[in-house]
Image: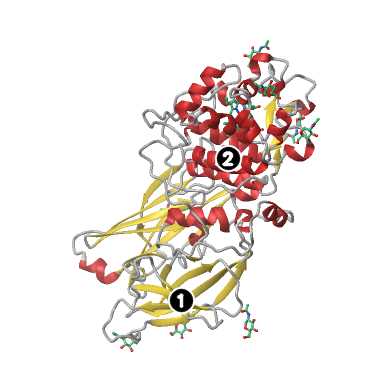
Amino acid sequence: MLFLRSRSLAALAVLHGLCFGQAHSAATLHWPDPQLDFLEDTLYSINSIGFLTENCDPRQNTTIAAQWLRLAYHDMSTHDATDGSGGLDASMIYELDRPQNVGIGMQQSLQDFVFFRTPYVGFADMIAMGVVMGVASCGGPIIPFRGGRVDAKVAGPATVPEPQQDLASHIASFNRQGFTQAEMIALVACGHTLGGVRRDDFPLIVDEKAPDGFGDFDGTAASRTSFDNAVVLEYLNGTTTNPLVASANVTARSDLRIFSSDGNSTMHRLASSNDFSETCKALLEQMINTVPKDVKLTDVIDPLENKVGSALLYTKNGSYVLQTNLRRLSVNPNRTVTLFWKERQTQGSLCPSTGCSVSSTRVSLDPPSFLGELRGIQKLSNYKFTTQIPLNASIAKFWFEVDEKDGSAPSIVDNDDGSGFEIDQDTVLFDPSRTTIVSEGFSGVFVIVVGVKDDILNAGGADAPHLTLESFEPGTQDFIAKIETVSLQRDTTHSPADGYTFFTGNISTGATAMHVHATVGGQKFTQYVVANDFMA
Ligand code: HEM
Ligand SMILES: *[C@@H]1O[C@H](CO)[C@@H](O)[C@H](O)[C@H]1NC(C)=O
Ligand SMILES: *[C@@H]1O[C@H](CO)[C@@H](O)[C@H](O)[C@H]1NC(C)=O
Ligand SMILES: *[C@@H]1O[C@H](CO)[C@@H](O)[C@H](O)[C@H]1NC(C)=O
Ligand SMILES: *[C@@H]1O[C@H](CO)[C@@H](O)[C@H](O)[C@H]1NC(C)=O
Ligand SMILES: *[C@@H]1O[C@H](CO)[C@@H](O)[C@H](O)[C@H]1NC(C)=O
Ligand SMILES: *[C@@H]1O[C@H](CO)[C@@H](O)[C@H](O)[C@H]1NC(C)=O
Ligand SMILES: *[C@@H]1O[C@H](CO)[C@@H](O)[C@H](O)[C@H]1NC(C)=O
Ligand SMILES: *[C@@H]1O[C@H](CO)[C@@H](O)[C@H](O)[C@H]1NC(C)=O
């Protein structure tokens, strides 16, 4: 895929008072953390869902950002603050046929997110992230993002507010969702700065004269696709074309009833664009963080200064190969990054007490996502390591030393507990070098190969080893992820080598991740592997 970049992003960032080169969070990743790893990548590093909306891109006479924002609000609006039930939990996948969720945008948006789920990150997190991405891409504030939402297994109550309802029911409805009346007024304005009402969906609200059958919430060409307070200003100066204010159908004027419900005082406050932006940032953050009460969200996810990639350990021609990488937010051509590692078998002590060390084999400079760019990241430096490790030494852990070569002391990049990034893969290991892809027309299989260390295998005695692959496939048709388990068999094409015996099993190329589960010699092992690693 080609990831185009917006030339206007720098200008946007300046408009929003951001400053390039601002201080980044220096927190080190707790490793491994596949949830944080994926969410941080998707936010700042890999322009995946962000790519769809990065220029506030249009779709269906509206914008993708508008569709994503409406989806998130409708999904959240099942929340009941009195008992903490419901909230942003992707229950929408079971609620699409309700009249209150009419509109092609719902289905289209879910389709946008369906591939970006993992065993650790659900649909609900992607719906919430869509708000952060969409709003920022249209020039709105950057809303802090937390992860950890849990996907519902069933539909929630049908509690999305509708235009023909009266003010009292709207106030009650927002109260139930956890918003005061003033917050309701602002949140509706923050939502209705993007997009509009489609005649196809609401023929009794939008009349046939509306261009393209679409009644924009704010009318001026420049404000139509921008997250600004034109919806407020036009309402206050009486020029608004917002169908929910000015429709000939008086019953349908829900925005008018809501906006004027406190004598316009909230709307007057939102006439300040700063106030509008700050208010929307806070309320939209509250909206995406409205989750069922037993769900615990993560800390806010900021760009990580140091990020350790996955570590693969496998055997090749009489030695182990370790592959990993360290990502840094900034570029410094003079910087050196060294990987240190400690052997598992300490007999004979191959490594000095300071550890064995190896320099990075390759540095790639990668563009950030558009949101990463808005956060002031210009390029990400990716230091890649491939190193051989003697079979009889193996590896217990590794860490990095970063020297900026600017006179400052080199810094150590270590796991948050200071004990190194531990590797527990030499008993059961996913082997990317023996794993292959076999395509069969449009689909195919990954023929996955896993090595098991002979001395542990033999020590197992009568206990046969038990190995399975649990593959994860995003459900593209019904939005329900497919998790399948296959047993691994002795691999007849790869003979035992380097002290390992190989096992194999097939998973669909539709899988984006898998767990290798093994019980060998009475011990349990698990390794999480993502699709990029199958194809390494
Ligand atoms: C009383 C509360 C609300 C009512 C009655 C209401 C009603 C509507 C209606 C009738 C549409 C047109 C949908 C279509 O044509 O398919 C719409 C669109 C939209 N609503 Fe609301 N809404 C409410 C609150 C909110 C809130 C709180 C948000 C978000 C914070 C929001 C965000 C949006 C967005 C972004 C669109 C445009 C969708 C697009 O262009 O595809 N709405 N709303
Ligand atoms: C805009 O709406 C008109 C009328 O419904 C439709 O013919 C046209 O295809 C729409 N354009 C896009 C880009 O969706
Ligand atoms: C006005 O719009 C509402 C909401 O769509 C609808 O229930 C009502 O029937 C409409 N009234 C008229 C006169 O079209
Ligand atoms: C009303 O406000 C909009 C948005 O600021 C502005 O573009 C328009 O010129 C104003 N119209 C009048 C009549 O004041
Ligand atoms: C609020 O503003 C609207 C739009 O300008 C206006 O029609 C209405 O009369 C105002 N209401 C009050 C109470 O000021
Ligand atoms: C495998 O290792 C041996 C000895 O270490 C070396 O001579 C040989 O070239 C290697 N083969 C490959 C394919 O790397
Ligand atoms: C890299 O080192 C050279 C030579 O010491 C120095 O002139 C240059 O400013 C350094 N570059 C950076 C980005 O620190
Ligand atoms: C590991 O193997 C190397 C030769 O490949 C040998 O020199 C070394 O002594 C061995 N170390 C141990 C602890 O067996
Ligand atoms: C796995 O797929 C390969 C390639 O299509 C095939 O040869 C092999 O029989 C399959 N193995 C199993 C256990 O289905």
Mark 2 and mark 1 residues within 8 Å of each other at the beta carbon: no
3D distance between C-alphas at marks 2 and 1: 40 Å
Give x and y (percent) for residue 216. 72, 30
Q: Nearer the viewer, residue 302 or 472?
A: 302
Q: Residue at x 58, y 40 (%)?
A: 279
Characterize the local packing of mark 1: few (<14), some (14-19) or many (20 or more) Cα atoms within 10 angstroms. few
Q: How many marks?
A: 2
Q: Is mark 2 within 8 Å of ligand 1?
A: no
Where residue 243 appears, as percent x and y from the top left, is 70, 23
Q: Secondary structure at mark 2?
A: helix
Q: Quadrant of ligand 8?
A: bottom left
Residue at the location (69% across, 15% down)? 249
Query: Which mark sits nearer the N-terminus, 2 or 1?
Result: 2
Quadrant containing the N terminus in the rendered view = bottom right
**In the image, residue 235 lies at what x, y percent?**
71, 28
> Does residue 250 appear left or right of residue 481 in this picture?
right
Foreground residue, 26 or 134? 26
Asked if residue 216 shows in the view, the reply is: no
Numbered mark located on residue 371 in the image = none
Q: Is residue 367 above or below residue 295?
A: below
Secondary structure beneath dot 1 equals strand
Q: Amino acid at mark 1?
A: Ser
Picture coordinates of residue 270 (x, y %)?
64, 36
Q: Is residue 202 left or right of residue 152?
A: right
Above or below — where is 59 with respect to 337? above
Seen as rendered, the residue at the extreme left is 462
Q: Is residue 213 visible?
A: yes
Q: Nearer the viewer, mark 2 or mark 1?
A: 2
Q: Which residue is mark 2?
A: 279
Q: Which residue is mark 1?
A: 411
In this picture, is 352 found above or below 82? below
Q: Quadrant of residue 505?
A: bottom left
